[in-house]
Amino acid sequence: MLKYMADAITYGLLGLTPGTHLADALNFFLYDTVKIFIMLSAIIFAVSIVRSFFPAEKTKKILSHRRAFIGNIMAALLGIVTPFCSCSAVPVFIGFVEAGVPLGITFSFLISSPMVNEIALVMLWGLFGWKVAAVYIAAGLTVAVFGGLMIGRLKLEKYVEEYVYQVKAPEVELAELTWRDRIEQACQYTLQILRKVWIFVVVGIAVGGLIHGYAPEDFLVKWAGRDNLFAVPVAVLIGVPLYSNAAGTIPIVHALMEKGMSIGTVLAFMMSVTALSLPEMIILRNVLKPRLIGIFAAIMAVSITIVGYLFNAIL
Amino acid sequence: MKIKVLGPGCKNCKTLEAAVVKVVAEMGLEASVEKVENYGKIVELGVMMTPGLIINGKIKSTGRLPKDDEIARWIKEEM
């Protein structure tokens, strides 16, 4: 139905000839924007409802004094359903450590929470299909579990700022939400997010549309195809400064994939954008000493690169 | 009445602070609106998800931007 609508506007209303660059680019743009906005609204709403059942306070209790591995898996999974924004990363970190959540398990949570986020999932699902989105979730969870396990194994507690261990948090009774509260808050949240990302989505899809309509079919095969071993690490590096702009970057990457970028490179790039970001490292400096930030960034960079190579090899 | 807005200074925290100041002014109340930006203090007050809103020592909301009428209702509860 959306396809029909996009066709009607491009070829009917505007009278463009099918097959021309302009018509292709515009048709692609209309179809994708409408589809993505419908999916974003529906999925952000659904995710917010689920999240209203998993406040950080509850997650903290579940993870407190867990053993490695099982604890890391639980933390990575809870990272998906616990609400999280980058400005909460530091208080969440302090709260977890204070509640006795082991450092490695706290990291599994901190890695998975921004990486497996609903906006990245919608964009991947909408543009690449559900299989790629599922692969992304599985790979993201794996990176979160193993990254956290490594940090736990390395005994890096001394590289956390001392004041973190002095903080004492009170026991907090959370008010029980009614279904009405949950729905109302989910609506509010959905609107807030849409207001924040719409411009990135539109610009991203527009640029993607231009690439789709105008760039030659195989112009990226040489640079970003699976045979170029540098493609994955370079994609990871480019992703570092692009924090939380999954909304704007995925449509562009999608168009690039049509022009020859390989899937492993795409996934590595996405993970780097969401989980290995310079602004987040700067925020985490409030609780972590530079050495631990360095180790964290190195573990993430290496594991994301491995994921990239792996999927380039098997898909 | 003591009102605390908790947040490290991100956009949502500033928006909440502005909303609280506006609601307090509209209600013509004498209330102190304090901004807590220190991370350790935020956690010690019992909040992990910012922005947080505490009125007279009670946590009213965390991790979201409440609407103006919700803020007004919470202030009334504490009067």
Image: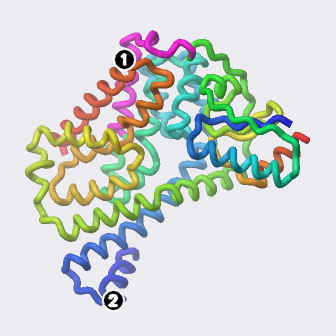
The residue singled out by tag 2 in the image is A12
User: Residue at image x 22%, y 44%?
Assistant: A265
Q: Position of residue A73 (x, y in %)?
A: 44, 27
For the residue pair A198 and A136, the one nearer the viewer reads as A198
Q: Amino acid at mark 2?
A: Gly
> Sequence order check: which comes first, mark 2 or mark 1?
2
The residue singled out by tag 1 in the image is A291
Q: Position of residue A53 (x, y in %)?
A: 63, 40
User: Residue at image x 47%, y 31%?
Assistant: A283
Mark 1 element type: helix
The quadrant of the image that shows the N terminus of chain A is bottom left
Q: Position of residue A35 (x, y in %)?
A: 41, 66
Chain label for disc 2: A
Chain label for disc 1: A
A16 displayed left or right of A137: left
Vertical arrangement, residue A19 with respect to residue A117, above or below = below
Q: Amino acid at mark 1?
A: Arg
